[in-house]
Amino acid sequence: MPLTVPKENFKALLAPRNGNGNFDRDEEDLLREALAAPFGTPTLRELVKEKKRITLVTSDHTRNMPSSKTLPILLEEIRAGNPEAEITLLIGTGLHRPTTEAEQRAMFGDDIVDRETILVNDAFRSKDFVNIGTLPSGASCKIHRAAVDADLLVTEGFIEPHFFAGFSGGRKSILPGICAAESINENHCFDAIAHPRSAAGVLAGNPIHEDMVAAARLAKVAFIFNVTLDHSKRISGAFAGELEAAHRAGVAFLTREIRCDAVQGDIVVTSNGGYPLDQNLYQSPKAVATAEKCAGTDGVIIMFASCVDGIGGERFEEVMRWGSPQETEQRMAAIPPKDTIPEMWCAQVYARILKKHPVILVSDYPDPDGIRAMNLIPAKSGQEALDIAFQLKGSDASVVVIPDGVCTLIV
């Protein structure tokens, strides 16, 4: 969507240096080189020898994972080491709705959907899960039976900043990816989200990250294959091997590429970087939390999100409508970890931000009154949003623009 900021108001545009996508490396070469030289493990084709049942966890429809490029190479690598392997692709949905067949075809390609065994995680179907232990927080770790029953567990994913887990990728394929709802809810409880180390770009001392690593260890993840993407969604790096070593390497590479120093503005404009992360309101606090770092004590945040798939979660919408941000936060704080309401963590992040910052939502969502009921200000265009923001902050307000608030790490 177009946005015209008056020259006298424009202060800064914050974007990763990898945003132009001008890489001279072929994506397939990057992928194959990573698999040939994994961090801390033998190659995948060595690991799969004499392993009958192999479960490969992949991402769902809400993620930019380029599985149509990675999965064929992973499957080829597995079958090169063990042609007789029984491979199950397990889509890690966390608490998201099930990935449809049409979405699978768009993500993986027709050949994989037609030829491979694919399971979609359903966090609410209790019979699918096995309790494999207790996490550092004290929460139970219940993961999908297809992972427990596997002779070898492999995951693929992509790494980007995450607004409370530090970064995506690596261990996140297991928790929340293929865990039961109760394990996910407790991992995302109020106290964990409120912890000062539960923030984008932070892994050390992050209690959410620590539980996620413990879950992946309990699940016996043998090999991960993670990629990073540039601003045009092109593969910029690939990292394979041992759970933490490969993830650390990817995080270090990505941090160098996307780190930006914070610039404070009276108005901060951002988005989730387009589809698929802007398809519902539930995903939107990821970029809003990035904008928060540049909005001072009371700056206005403008969030662009299509919301073509609506609000994105019944419980999220319910909590967002509880009352004022202060009232909502107080009610959530009183909920014990084991009783955490699904999806309330995104409402918690919104409540924290809305206590200080007006948030204007530019979207196609057809119910402006519904948006207002969630303490957001609706707008249909960038110009309308800017007009509202200038009314709130004055005609001389400074404007900072963060085009992709998910893929930009503000420090």
Image (cartoon, rainbow, N blue to C red):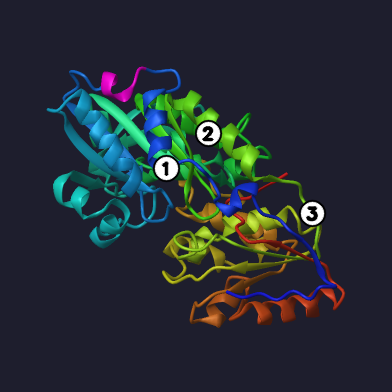
Amino acid type of the residue that numbered disc 2 sits on in the rendered structure: Gly
Percent across and percent down for residue 228 are 50, 42
Picture quadrant where residue 75 is located: top left
**Furthest-front residue in this view:** 24
Name the residue: 34% across, 21% down: 43
Amino acid type of the residue that numbered disc 1 sits on in the rendered structure: Glu
In this rendering, the answer to whether 393 lies above or below 203 is below
Q: Which residue is mark 3?
A: 263
279 sits left or right of 145 in the view: right
Image quarter (top left, top right, bottom left or bottom right) of the N terminus: bottom right
In this rendering, the answer to whether 175 lies above or below 42 is below
Name the residue: 85% across, 78% down: 395
Q: Element type at marker 1?
A: helix
**In front here: 252 or 299?**
252
Residue at mark 2 to residue at mark 3: CA–CA distance: 26 Å
Disc 1 versus disc 2: nearer the observer: 1
Residue at mark 1 to residue at mark 2: CA–CA distance: 15 Å
Percent across and percent down for residue 205 are 63, 29
Percent across and percent down for residue 20 are 59, 54
Looking at the image, is mark 2 or mark 3 earlier in the sequence?
A: 2
Q: Magenta span covers which residues? A: 42-47
Q: Decide: few, some or many residues near mark 3? Use Cα within 10 Å; few <14, some 14-19, many ≥20.
A: some
Amino acid type of the residue that numbered disc 3 sits on in the rendered structure: Val
Q: Decide: few, some or many residues near mark 2? Use Cα within 10 Å; few <14, some 14-19, many ≥20.
A: many
Q: Decide: few, some or many residues near mark 1? Use Cα within 10 Å; few <14, some 14-19, many ≥20.
A: some
Looking at the image, is mark 1 or mark 3 earlier in the sequence?
A: 1
Using the image, tell me which numbered label, if any, was put on residue 27: 1
Image quarter (top left, top right, bottom left or bottom right) of the C terminus: top right
